[in-house]
Image (cartoon, coloured by chain):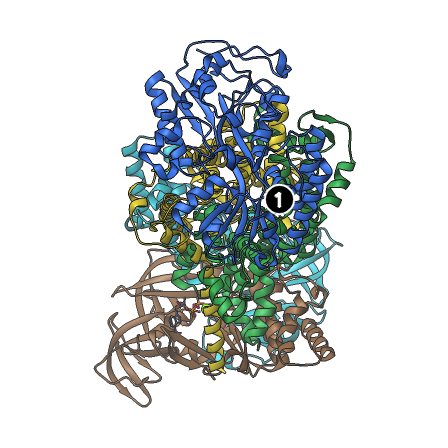
Chain colours: A brown, B cyan, C yellow, D green, E blue
Amino acid sequence: VTDLPAFRRPTNTVFQSYALFPHRSVEQNVAFGLQRQTVDRAEVRRRVAEELERVGLSGEAKRKPAQLSGGQQQRVALARALVNRPAVLLLDEPLGALDLKLRKQLQVELKRIQRDVGITFIYVTHDQEEALTMSDRIAVMNRGVVEQVADPETVYERPATTFVAGFIGVSNLMPGEVIAANGDGAQLRLDAGPTVRTPQSGGATSGERAHAVVRPEKLVLSPVGEGGDAGRPSVEGQVESSLYLGTATQMVVRLGDDTRMTVLVPNADAEARRDLPAAGDSARLSWSDENIHIVREGQAE
Amino acid sequence: VTDLPAFRRPTNTVFQSYALFPHRSVEQNVAFGLQRQTVDRAEVRRRVAEELERVGLSGEAKRKPAQLSGGQQQRVALARALVNRPAVLLLDEPLGALDLKLRKQLQVELKRIQRDVGITFIYVTHDQEEALTMSDRIAVMNRGVVEQVADPETVYERPATTFVAGFIGVSNLMPGEVIAANGDGAQLRLDAGPTVRTPQSGGATSGERAHAVVRPEKLVLSPVGEGGDAGRPSVEGQVESSLYLGTATQMVVRLGDDTRMTVLVPNADAEARRDLPAAGDSARLSWSDENIHIVREGQAE
Amino acid sequence: MTLRRRGIDWLLNAYAGLALVYLLVPIAVIVVFSFNNPIGRFNFIWQDFSLDAWKHPFAVQGVGDALKTSLEIAALSTVGATILGTLTALALVRYEFKGRAPVNFFIFIPLATPEVVLGAALLSQFLNLGTPQLGFATILIAHIMFNLSFVVITVRSRLIGFDRSLEEAAQDLGATPWETFRLVTLPLIMPGVISAALLAFALSIDDFVITNFNSGSTITFPLFIWGAARVAIPPQIYVIATMIFLFTVAVMILTVWQQRRAEKMAAVRPDDAEPPLGPPEPAFAQRAAA
Amino acid sequence: MPARLRKAALPYLLLLPGLGWLLLFFAIPLLYMAVESLKTGTIDTGFRLTWEFSNYTNALSDYSEQFVRSFEYAGLATAISLLIGYPLAYVIAFRGGRYRNALLLLVIVPFFVTYLIRTLSWETILSDSGIVVNTLQTVGIVSGDGRLLDTTVSVVAGITYNFLPFMILPLYASLERIDGRLLEAGYDLYGRRRDVFLRVTLPLSMPGVVAGVLLTFIPAAGDFINAELLGTPRQFMIGNVIQSRYLEVADYPTAAALSFLLMAFMLVLVVIWARIAGTEALLGTEGERR
Amino acid sequence: GTDEPAGSGQKASEQKPIAKGKIADSLYIANWPLYIDEKRQSLQDFQKKYGTKIKYVEEVNDNTEFFGKVRQQYSQGEAGGRDIHVVTDWMAARMIRLGFVQKLDHSAMPNVDQNLIERLKSPPFDPKRDFSVPWQSGLTGIIYRKDKVKREPKSVDDLFDPAYKGKVTMLTEMRDTVGVVAASMGADPEKASVDEFMKAIDKIGQASDSGQIRGFTGNEYTKDITKGDSWAIIGWSGDAVQLQADNPNIQFVLPETGGHLWTDNMQVPVGAPHAFTAEKYMDFVYQPEVQAVIAAYVNYICPVNGVKEVLAKEDPAIANNPLIFPDESFLKDTFIFRGLKPDEEQQLDNAFQKVIGA
Ligand SMILES: Nc1ncnc2c1ncn2[C@@H]1O[C@H](COP(=O)(O)OP(=O)(O)OP(=O)(O)O)[C@@H](O)[C@H]1O
Ligand SMILES: Nc1ncnc2c1ncn2[C@@H]1O[C@H](COP(=O)(O)OP(=O)(O)OP(=O)(O)O)[C@@H](O)[C@H]1O
Ligand SMILES: [Mg+2]
Ligand SMILES: [Mg+2]
């Protein structure tokens, strides 16, 4: 495809900066692509109207881009691309320029429209949450190299590399040494002390260095001493800080080997929160085997 | 204060757009304020250096703003204001222009610096999470009117008005009628069916319309039929959509009276997620009394 | 396809090249003929190469004084027009006040008025008043007059792209209004002001028409050329022209360079960058739009 | 409070010097000229105000030819400038790359050679025995005994040359502002180069065209130097008449009347032009403000 | 030391001559371009002798243009600092008529009385030379390129020969052009009627419209003829002489029907700050040896007797050139354009201005 001139390619792009034609009205903007492909007048008008309808801008058809809000401009850019029914639609950080609330709202809308028209969207974003919520499949790129392609859940639960782990969500990386690895899992002696078992070996071979990854919400925080259910693997450390997020409380725990672990404690019920350890207290972090995951050094960029 | 000319006021501001002087070097920018107040040369140099040290830009002292990254520019703006040791520092969406990752990082830094210099920061932001994590007290304004002033937890857990409830975090507003209210709580008959008790009356009087608010993470989702623990109040509805957020799964449930309720289910363990109801299933939402809160119609903007 | 495109590109570039040649040929001729060694008075047939004219560029009686007068007037009128014009521009861009639109229009009229008319009108005034006596003073007055609008418009175009929050910031940091202007506003509009000054200087030193009306017995460089042109232009004049030319080019290169630096730092949107001798384009666009 | 008062007065204080100057040496002179234009008399007997409005009708009927010619030539020159200037500005803006400023400098270069001299240089270039004429004669474009100098061709060529930069600079300014991503978008939406140029580039450069046309046409229509040096009375424009009526025949009333007529025509044309082109220009600039 | 300026607008007759005074230390002369030797010897000598610094400004490019410039001041008795201006006969006449110039005191100018050539002693507009002293005189005739024309033009009619279409120029000075053409049509410009002049103007107009006449010029015709852009033109003798020096193909011929003899005169404007010194200078340049330097350079008709002799030694070529030192027989083919009444002048000027397109 790349060696076709742009105007021959069966794709369209929604530009990071929208790149709307300032001198053309909304509908003229949307019509631009069709007019280039000798579609007859009436047809053009019909499809433009339909597309504006879809993005809910029928009212603004005659306006000039400069007279629209950021969100509306974004929708025009979208309509302008969609109206051509490309095989693939490339969206380059389409919501990057909008403020939080508007972004959230347009995310939902974009999903709706995508389902509606059934075109493949390639959606470029820096916002991990956006990535997780919007996509069927995510490709995480690092310095132009794809590090993992998978469905959101896999990318989040089982990041392929430390970069992915760090980029999507908060990563808790515990360094250690693989002491045993085979088809159904591996054993890792953490520098923090305990030895842990992971469900997959992630191709690690015994003897090599690797990281164990646990997501913050998968960690259970309990006061030291009372052993918790001994079955579960756990590490100990000292609470460094505690941050109230509303839906949850985020705590940072420093382990023996100075690795920082982030724990997300849902604010399910108030008293539960009240007896959370405060900064300075020492605490135990435990998790269930299935929630730990191994990432090999090598893959760490 | 307001009728003093700007240049006489004991406050300083960090502007939304930083408004750094492009023709002056970083240190000249920072020195600007002090030079206006006949502080002697050496003193100025000392304090500027110290301030740049604080924001970690000693290395860039001689650079021009245009040669700095967004984050660095932000820090210069901060230093330029701080160096004057104002009684109050006003920050107008200081991180608004930065991208997610950088924002998070600078939030932490700002907190550190604030503790460090001990100046009162007035921090304007649209980002609810920022508000919750950064502040000791939050004032929520709607159309220039302050709707609530309180510490983050109170604002989140017990919003004073429906606007506040909606603005800070996702709000689940269940409309209903107050059937009884007194000092230690009120009773509300929800349009969705059940009657609920709330810990405070929020000044509501029986007979009037009001909303019951429950935060998404406080709701417990269980399949219909199995009554759950009957003690807990609950409502029934139909799952509309389910969104994977990584740390949690967000589900929208439509109640009998078409109120939409958002539920946040922590992704604590995998199988728990697996047997979450899918879109279309009907489900029961329950909560504990202490987590429900009453907001009066009137206050709803 | 791509071949055809390359063809078009080539043609376009060639065309542009020719256009440039058209612009430069006459200047080449001037430079060349400054080295001519004409027989007799007339210097428009190439005889043979000679440096005589370059050795004594001011040998021709009166040309030195004329040039001196021109430079003095250009310098003074540039200073005058630049100051007055900048103040006016500031008022127009910075303040909402009664009668701004009419003022804007009034500023524009001189630009839409042919030089002949400007000169003639001013002359009728001087003639009717009888004073001041036509000469240096009247030329200076005239030059400041026709330069003003150009300055206003050039500076204004710069001010329009100016980020006001910078001034708020300065005030917030305790700068008095005057300090704010001196330390923030002025340095930032300086490139615009410099462009304006250059433009004014160029227009002034080059002006014949208006000067011719109001010069009395004072003779500027263009007037001298006009007189000489009726008889014969000695090579010395081409020499001086070439010298002026080379000098201005040097100045230009310097300003372009320093403006580039200015633009880099400037808070105004980079697309406000104007060629140093850039015309009052935005203003005209605005007027045209009004 | 006094501070407030001062604030309110400030814009007027800033305006005072510049505006005052223009009032004193532009507006009032026009009044004097108005009076002058209604007088009768001869240079010897002196002129008396007799409200002779016929001066205007006479001037118009006597010199309609020169009026028409002026606008003819100016229009021609403007059109040609546009044809020459647009591609050049386009190439500099989009292909100039690193050399943009250098190329721009070349465009402005003619400014740095005294107007009269560069015009005289054309006299040399176009002279009957010069290279240009000879080659054109051998090619047969110009008849054997034909000539270029002292013809419409030479005059229009001179005008075009002298005001070409006024066309190019605004064109460049507006082209250079066009956001490259808009063109990208154009191609992405199946636009061929032609489409993208006609539908995107051209409309967005309208402000430049508007400004350029104004900046070229106005001085061109008032010019008399080119006709004087490169033409003969048969090419004389209204400017020639005004200046000779004023400075040579000392027929002030007619000269003043002509001046006003010229100025009136000019303003009318400008306003009309602004109305036609206005909207376009406005939108163009609006676009950049984003 | 300045002298009493005479009140303006006074009738010439009643005016008192310039009072004697002492030599001022500065003097302002307004003259035509290139109308004096390059070194300006006479100025330096004058300064050597009287210690007067002379401001010599070449500001007269055209009689009417100059008149337009100074009229306002002169009419208010202001000379604009000028002590001497040099204008052509008819303009000199107008200046006198308007009382713009001061009456000269011949007793202060012995050399003038003694050396002024006969032919110029009493022109119609100033019979006793009370208000004007000739600077240089000249002839208006035909200049042509020997190498371009097919045969030597004898009369002005030859300029209307279609063979020279587009290669003919005439002068913007109305009296020069109209004079010679009218003469070629059988009129005598010394006393011709306005109608006869108008006829000439019509003829010129037709030729101009037909393109026969390339254009009307001031001094700048010298360029065209040298370049060869024009072949046969109406021009001035002095230029012809100078041009010849550079290009022998350039020739001057006095039309059989008569050429125009004109004079550029020095005058002292009313209000001149150094009128007496001005007289002294006029007298000064009427010394043959001083005048010789000027004559040798400008090559117009020299109004001063005795110069020929001076030059005979140094530069016989010039001394024997009839265009510079014409004998009476040569001068009989010349006419001096008659003085015009203001209304006549207005009429002819307007008509002529129309023809030449300005
Ligand atoms: N293939 C390439 N060759 C040369 N330079 C490139 C190339 N790709 C990108 N760049 C340079 O890297 C810079 C960033 O490119 P680009 O805008 O594609 O990054 P991006 O990933 O889109 O950034 P963002 O995600 O913030 O939009 C560009 O300004 C360009 O100069
Ligand atoms: N007191 C006021 N009087 C008049 N207009 C006002 C006033 N306050 C604000 N505005 C108008 O409202 C607009 C927005 O004002 P302002 O920038 O203060 O909003 P904001 O809350 O800061 O927005 P954001 O939070 O996005 O920065 C301004 O452009 C201004 O025109
Ligand atoms: Mg990008
Ligand atoms: Mg704000």
Q: Residue furthest front?
A: E329
> Dot 1 corresponds to which residue?
D239
Residue C67 visible to the viewer: no
* Depth check, front residue: D80 or A248: D80
Question: What's the chain of the residue with tag 1?
Answer: D
Tell me the crowding category of disc 1: few under 14, some 14 to 19, or many 20 or more residues within 10 angstroms, Cα based.
many
- Residue type at tag 1: Gly
Q: Is residue C126 above or below residue E168?
A: above
Q: Position of residue C240 (x, y in %)?
A: 37, 43
Q: Position of residue D163 (x, y in %)?
A: 53, 52
Residue A277 visible to the viewer: yes
* Depth check, front residue: B42 or A61: A61
Q: Position of residue A98 (x, y in %)?
A: 54, 61
Q: Position of residue A104 (x, y in %)?
A: 56, 66
Instruction: Name the residue rendered at 58%, 56% in the picture.
Output: E166
Q: Quick check: A179 left or right of E207?
A: left
